[in-house]
Amino acid sequence: METRIGVGYDIHRLVSERKLFIGGVEIPYIKGLLGHSDADVLIHAICDALLGAIAEKDIGELFPDTDPKYQGISSSELLKVVLELVRKKGYQVSNLDTVIIAEEPKFAPFKNRIQESLSKIMNIDKDRVGLKAKTNEGLGELGRKEGIACYATVLIKKES
């Protein structure tokens, strides 16, 4: 059975007057992430990991921020399009591992909901969705609470 691995990364600036979406879940917080879509940094990293695993363009090329049809779109919808590309190439997601890097908000109370959301969108069991949240120990832009970054690694396998 052929397997492939993809790695994705994304970062967005925190700003006032925006809602915060992480993994398809709205997180109550005083700021949200700046972006053309809903700026769900976790889903964007997952999309890039999947696109890398199938050797496709990255999320910025596939869904350019110059295209008005993506203005304010839910990143969950973008992930569904990417998953369809993965399926068309004959692959299915085996598992996903992710890291959220943020000083605030604290993600522990939301981890279960985020895992459930991703498992539903990706049509995989929740125990195949790894999710960790880390701080940047006060260092750099992330440590100063200016943004949130995410890493994602995905394993896909050829469908039998």
Image (cartoon, helix red, strand yellow):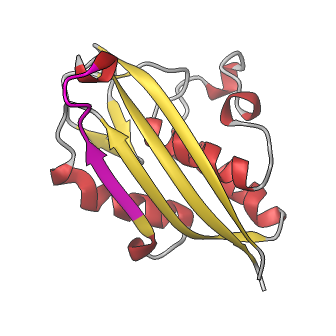
Residue in the image at 31% along x and 17% along y: 140
Asked whether, in this view, residue 110 is left or right of residue 12, the answer is left
Quarter of the N terminus within the rendering: bottom right
The answer to whether residue 108 is left or right of residue 124 is left
Report if residue 145 lies within the magenta region. no
Residue 156, x across and y down, in percent: 66, 67
In this view, 101 is above or below 79: above
Query: Magenta stretch containing residue 131, yes or no?
Result: yes
> In which quarter of the view is residue 19 placed?
top left
In the rendered image, the residue lying farthest to the right is 89
Rendering coords of residue 105 (x, y %): 19, 34
Q: Nearer the viewer, residue 119 or 73?
A: 119
Q: In this picture, is 136 found above or below 151?
A: above
Q: Position of residue 122 (x, y in %)?
A: 55, 63
Task: Answer with the quarter of the image where residue 116 lies.
Answer: bottom left
Residue found at x 61% / y 65%? 155
* Residue at (31, 23) in percent of width and height: 142
Quadrant for the C terminus in the image: bottom right
Left or right of residue 49, residue 1 in this image: right
Q: Residue at x 68, y 28 (%)?
A: 60
Extent of the magenta region: 130-139
Q: Answer left or right for 141 relative to 69.
A: left
